Image: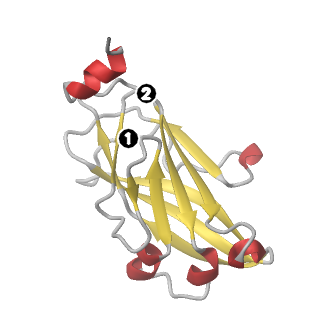
Amino acid sequence: METKAETNQVKGVKTPTNRKVDIIVKAHDLYPLPPTEKNVDANTELLDDEKHKSPFGASKKNYETIVFMGFDMTWDIEVEYKNGEDKEYKVELVSINHNPKPSGNPNLFDVNPLKPKKHSNNKRIHGTIVHSSPSPEDYTIHFQIFKNDKDPHPFHLDPKLKINPE
């Protein structure tokens, strides 16, 4: 017997739920590089709670996460090798901005920009989806890398969110 979630997946309909994306960073490799899209794509991976990912080296601008009205979206960030080359590096989320198209459309999030809560150690940002859009929406993940807790280097990613119409 299929569960409701299994039935919905078979029919192509997703059960509304909170969503999460992990950002994994090759901090040792990215830190000394200019913050170009190519460099960031090569040294970051995005992985969602349904195991869909944009691996290291793949473009992040077409990475799309399906989200739901009234539900939360959470982003976490971490270094790839916590005990290897990256042990002297730290990554932090700075903010997440919705970039509405066309300009003037309502923001998808309850607050824009989204910022980390103080208790999150700048490793997590979450917000609630409060507006719908018929097409995928661009947003920007701003993060920074520190070496030995000093000299932050800023970077950003520009993936997409798609509101599930159901």
**Residue 99: numbered disc:** none
Answer with mark 2 or mark 1, whichever residue precedes in sequence: 2
Residue at 54% across / 88% down in the picture?
33
Residue at 53% across / 52% down in the picture?
22
Residue at 32% across / 15% down in the picture?
2
**Residue 108: numbered disc:** 1
Q: How many neighbours does mark 2 have within 10 angstroms: few (below 14), some (14-19), or many (20 or more)?
A: few
Q: Is residue 66 left or right of residue 140?
A: left
Residue 125, position as x, y percentages in the image: 59, 47
Q: Is residue 151 left or right of residue 60?
A: right
**Structural distance between the alpha carbons of marks 2 and 1:** 16 Å
SS at badge 1: loop
How many numbered dots are placed on residues in this image?
2
Image coloring type? secondary structure
Q: Can residue 78 be seen in the rendering of this structure?
A: yes
* Foreground: disc 2 or disc 1: 2
Kind of residue at disc 1 = Leu
| Camera-nearest residue between 68 and 52 | 52
Tell me which corner region of the image, top left, top right, bottom left or bottom right, holds residue 131: top left
Q: How many neighbours does mark 1 have within 10 angstroms: few (below 14), some (14-19), or many (20 or more)?
A: many
Tell me which corner region of the image, top left, top right, bottom left or bottom right, holds residue 61: bottom left
Residue at 35% across / 70% down in the picture?
58
Kind of residue at disc 2 = Thr
Q: Is residue 125 left or right of residue 62?
A: right
In the rendered image, the quadrant that contains the N terminus is top left
In the rendered image, the quadrant that contains the C terminus is top left
SS at badge 2: loop
Q: Can residue 13 be seen in the rendering of this structure?
A: no
Residue 55, position as x, y percentages in the image: 41, 65
Residue 120, position as x, y percentages in the image: 72, 47
Residue 13, position as x, y percentages in the image: 24, 26
**Residue 17: numbered disc:** 2
